Amino acid sequence: MASIESHFATENVPRLLSRYELSYYQEDNCIEYFIVDKNTHEQISYAIIFSLNRDSKELHVSRFCPELHKQIDAKYLSAACFYILIHHFGNIYHLSKDYSITLETRGATYKAFFSRLKDFDFLDQGLRLFKTAAIMGEYPEIDVNTSMIEKKSLQEGKTPFEVC
């Protein structure tokens, strides 16, 4: 791999993993992620859903609501979460650096969060409907250990979000 893991990630991902368990449910080209507090066993995340479009070579962030900003002493944990989950998704689907990451978000969210994620070099591609910003960045092909993220199977009577 050409790139190396960032100082930000080596400092903040262990903080995230010391407090939270990460798991996922996979269906075809879509993964829904879950964040659970290790102490209380409470699910923290609201909706974290990534999907893959192999034709356009895009990893699409359908939803990213980790809700970590509502937790105590959580500075940088949402960014660390985004970092580890993007690389987990990339590892699952064996993505190469010719893939891009795409998402749509409010302009204010782009400025306050996504534009500050230096590991991804996101650019605002312009406004879309309902004043959302179309965001695109390169997938940074980095060999990141994501083995701590546990795969879940559906429990009877429960279904994942059907956004994919």
Image (spheres, grey):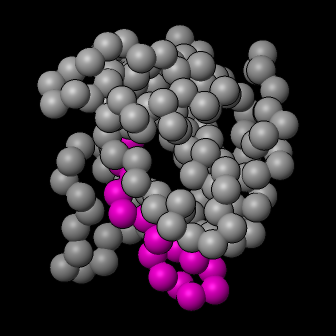
Say if residue 106 shows up in the picture. Answer: yes
The image shows residue 133 at horizontal and vertical percentages of 32, 24
Residue plotted at (37% across, 12% down): 125
For residue 38, above or below residue 59: below
**Magenta segment range?**
35-53
Q: Report whether 13 appears left or right of 110.
A: right
Say if residue 99 shows up in the picture. Answer: no
The image shows residue 2 at horizontal and vertical percentages of 78, 16
Residue plotted at (22% across, 28% down): 131
Kindly indicate the quadrant of the structure image that contains residue 86. top right
16, 54: nearer the viewer:
16
For residue 127, above or below residue 150: above
Q: Report whether 36 appears left or right of 160.
A: right
Is residue 19 a member of the stretch shown in magenta?
Answer: no
Residue plotted at (40% across, 22% down): 135
Furthest-left residue in this view: 129
Q: Quadrant of the C terminus?
A: top left
Q: Report whether 10 appears left or right of 71.
A: right
The image shows residue 56 at horizontal and vertical percentages of 33, 14
Is residue 37 a member of the stretch shown in magenta?
Answer: yes
The image shows residue 39 at horizontal and vertical percentages of 63, 86
Q: How many marks?
A: 0
Kindly indicate the quadrant of the structure image that contains residue 61. top left
